[in-house]
Image (tube, helix red, strand yellow):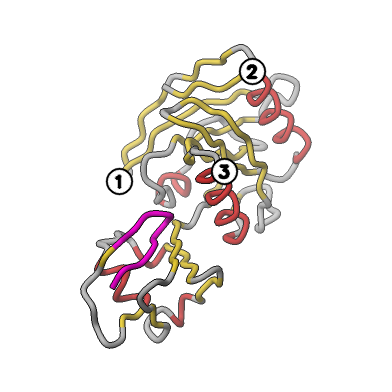
Amino acid sequence: MLTIPEAIHRAVLEHARQGFPLEVCGILGGTDGCVKSHFPMTNTDASNEHFTMEPREQFSVVKALRAEGQEMVAIYHSHPESPARPSEEDIRLAFTPNVYHLIVSLLDREQPVAKAFSISDGVVEAAEITIAAG
Amino acid sequence: MNLTVNGKAASVAETATLSVNGLLDALNVAQKEYVTVEVNGDIVERELFSTTTVKDGDTVEFLYFMGGGAQ
């Protein structure tokens, strides 16, 4: 189960909305599935259909998390014009182990929907999201 | 050879020249073609994985490509 503080959940949805029509991406840090930090990342593809994180930013975030006693809990990205479920590309490129994949759909831009998944070796499992106060 | 890998101490068999590629193999890193590597703060270009060497005391970071798409 992925637990996200309400403020971070709202910030992720807003990041997706602000980035429209492009895909946005980011990293959520924390411990044991509980999110404590939010890092919007650069989508170097600057695309409506793809995202790639910038490696220097990735290293920087990983080190910052480590310094805070946190780890990468989830990777998120938006689907500006498709549902909140992993695409074939998302599944094929899900290499990082032990992280949730949070996908924000902007099919309804006024009511974005975020869903979480575990993806391992091509197997996708929906994960429950709990929105915590704070 | 003692290294720091992703913030943790790691020990690998001492060789005269251990390449980044060799280190990833020694660490049993899966799908290493999708890994980005940093040695002592500098990103190593993938085409230099075989020729860039690491030495005792180096700090190595690696992480996987993070990307995807909506289609």
Residue type highlighted by circle 3: Ala
Quadrant of residue A114 within the rendered picture: top right
The answer to which of marks 1 and 2 sits earlier in the sequence is: 2
Write down the quadrant of residue A81 in the picture.
top right
Q: Is residue A42 magenta?
A: no
What's the chain of the residue with tag 1? A
Mark 1 residue type: Asp
Chain at tag 3: B
Image height of B68 relative to B14, above or below: above
**In the figure, residue A119 lies in which quadrant?**
top left
Residue nearest the observer in this picture, B27 or A2:
B27
Q: Which residue is mark 1?
A: A121
Horizontal and vertical percent position of residue A41: 66, 47
Q: Nearer the viewer, residue A39 or A83?
A: A39
- Chain at numbered mark 2: A
Q: Are discs 1 and 2 both within one chain?
A: yes
**As drawn, A21 above or below A111:** below
Q: Residue at x 59, y 40 (%)?
A: A77
Instruction: Decide: few, some or many residues near mark 2? Use Cα within 10 Å; few <14, some 14-19, many ≥20.
Output: some
Q: Position of residue B28 (x, y in %)?
A: 25, 62
Q: Residue B67: percent from the left, percent from the top?
A: 53, 52
| Label 1 close to label 2 by CB (< 8 Å) | no
Q: Secondary structure at mark 2?
A: helix
Q: Amino acid at mark 2?
A: Glu
Residue at the far right: name it: A18
Q: CA distance from mark 1 to mark 2?
A: 31 Å
In the picture of the structure, the residue carrying the numbered disc 2 is: A6
In reply to whether residue B5 is colored magenta, the answer given is yes
Label 1, residues with CA under 10 Å away: few <14, some 14-19, many ≥20: few
Magenta residues, as a range?
A: B1-10
